[in-house]
Image (cartoon, rainbow, N blue to C red):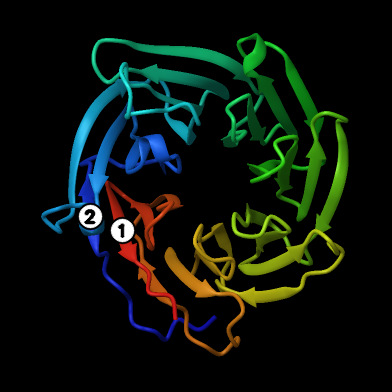
Amino acid sequence: MKMSTALTPPTFVIPLNKQIYCFEISSYESSSNLFVAALQTKIVMGLFQFPEDNANEEFTWERLRELDQDTRSHAIALAPDTSLSMLPKLVKFCTAGADFVVRIFRSNLDDSDTVQEVNRHTSYVNDVAWESSGRFLASVSDDHSCQIRSQHDDYKSEIVFRLKSPGVVVRWHPESPEKVLVAEKRGTIHIYNIESRQIVHSIETNKSPLMGADWCLRNPFLVTALAAGEASVFDLRCPYRAMETKTLHEDGGLAIKYSPNTQQVVASIGRPNVSLVVTHLKSEKTELPLLVASLKLYGGLGWHSRLPYICCADDSKLSFWKVFVK
């Protein structure tokens, strides 16, 4: 895709003063506008409000709490039982450490912070994800495995799916909690049923390396993959060939995520340089993207769950762009 459109500066910025390695914005109603961001030795929890939610019609944010971490985190995910609406408050999230360990952090944002080691891979952990009810926690790694732990026995038991290349992305089905999507770097996506422990769908991209994949919240039959800079959309009712393909990044892609508010718009990160691109997948290939922005250092990508904002960790700040869908 030729980036001939003008670069768009961020609409709002949260400065955290140190490089951000990964972050997540809460997608749960009970913790709306909460974020967690992993720096080199700390994890920052904060709360923001967009003008649409603020009586003063301003963007505001506050730092709620900081936790120390002994190792840098490569991935982070907030748990569904995180809640700021009841007392005691609970912020619960998992991290994938550079020491190959998956940890669960819990904080009441006051006087109680705990950390629990629940899983150890034998190589780098590239992604972590909670099942929608919080019963299961999944992680994928360069050690060619997807490991799933159950809350039922304090995350001691495990289900292991052996992969044929590094696991790069894991996503739970938006409506069927027994199904989990695992994307491999070689260009394969398998959807497993954790009850039968069988593959129920398989997808092959025409290119590799596959670096990003996502499940569409608006239409769970749709899965998108980003391989070698090309986005492919698959319909699980006929997963053997892509129903749409579109080159988003000429020199390769790093991540892709569906907008939670429409099944046609995705945000992606890729090269040349490091660029954020928001595009309408159904539009003509010659049409310009909805938004293009340049990043200094990439540290994560996430949509707000209700409002039309996309967020990137860009070096030491969280940058938000308002997306105007045509």
- Which amino acid type is shown beneath numbered disc 2? Val
Question: Taking 62 as reference, is 78 left or right?
Answer: right
Q: Residue at x 35, y 61 (%)?
A: 295
Question: Residue 130, how many percent across, how many down?
Answer: 58, 32
Q: Residue at x 38, y 28 (%)?
A: 83
Q: Which residue is mark 1?
A: 320
Mark 2 is surrounded, within 10 Å at the Cα level, by few (under 14), some (14 to 19) or many (20 or more) other residues, namely some
- Which quarter of the image is occupied by the N terminus? bottom right
Tell me if residue 254 can be seen.
yes
Question: Residue 271, how many percent across, how many down?
Answer: 50, 67
Foreground of the two, 130 or 85: 85
Question: Taking 322 as reference, is 166 left or right?
Answer: right
Tell me if residue 273 can be seen.
no
In terms of image quadrants, where is residue 127? Answer: top right
Q: Are marks 1 and 2 in contact (CB under 8 Å)?
A: yes
Q: Residue at x 86, y 64 (%)?
A: 238
Q: On screen, 95 above or below 234?
A: above
Question: Taking 44 as reference, is 194 left or right?
Answer: right
For label 1, the SS is strand
Mark earlier in primary sequence (1, 2): 2
- Which amino acid type is shown beneath numbered disc 1? Phe
Q: On screen, 120 above or below 316?
A: above
Question: Residue 5, how many percent across, how many down?
Answer: 39, 84
Question: Residue 134, how many percent across, how many down?
Answer: 58, 27
Foreground of the two, 204 or 92: 92
In terms of image quadrants, where is residue 182? Answer: top right
Q: Residue at x 46, y 70 (%)?
A: 278
Q: Which residue is mark 2?
A: 13
Mark 1 is surrounded, within 10 Å at the Cα level, by few (under 14), some (14 to 19) or many (20 or more) other residues, namely many
